[in-house]
Image (cartoon, grey):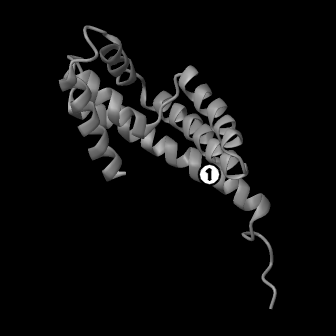
Amino acid sequence: YAGNFVGSLFLAYLAFKSGTLGAAPASVAIATAKCSLPFATTFVRGILCNWLVCMAVYMASGCASLAGKMVAVWFPISAFVALGLEHSVANMFIIPLGIMRGANVSAMDFLTKNLLPVTLGNIVGGALCVMGLYGSAFGNWFKPKEE
């Protein structure tokens, strides 16, 4: 998590300093919008997002071919982007980039209004909605131990 955060900040800084984005305002608008949502909305978007991301990983792990893995990952990830859901690691890049480009978002706003609820939602989405359900259905959690 910390490595993703440091790497995302570094990549955002490089994208900002490269000047390749021109005057495109998308990162500023995205950063502002993502940090303007209520905690509960952001939390639920985090749950839904990581549910899709974990399902993409789960489905890809069941594929033998590279093409199968690509298709398995493509649809859930495209869905989370198209639906405007929240992923903590993706936001670790786009919101700091928006801040560097002039978004009226403070570092504290980013951390408390977005990264915290999104991270908590991502944990619930991955741990409970995917791992918890699959572990309960196919694992040994609720089976009596044989002696």
Tell me if I can see residue 109 in this picture: no
Q: Is residue 111 positioned above or below 142 on the image?
A: above
Q: Callout 1 environment at 10 Å: few (<14), some (14 to 19), or many (20+)?
A: some
Residue 60 x, y percent position in the rendering: 67, 46
**Nearer-the-camera pick, 97 or 140:** 97
Is residue 48 left or right of 96 when viewed as pictured? right
Q: Which residue is found at the position 24% from the left and 39% from the top?
A: 10
Q: Is residue 114 positioned above or below 25 on the image?
A: below
Q: Which residue is found at the position 72% from the left and 69% from the top?
A: 141
Assign the C terminus to one quadrant of the image: bottom right
Is residue 8 left or right of 87 when viewed as pictured? left
Q: Secondary structure at mark 1?
A: helix
Residue 1 x, y percent position in the rendering: 37, 51
Is residue 132 left or right of 33 when viewed as pictured? right
Residue 70 x, y percent position in the rendering: 64, 37
Residue 87 x, y percent position in the rendering: 47, 36
Q: Is residue 84 positioned above or below 49 on the image?
A: above
Q: Amino acid at mark 1?
A: Leu
**Nearer-the-camera pick, 66 or 93:** 66
Q: Which residue is found at the position 21% from the left and 27% from the top?
A: 106
Is residue 15 left or right of 123 when viewed as pictured? left
Query: Mark 1 highlights which residue?
Result: 128
Tell me if I can see residue 42 in this picture: yes
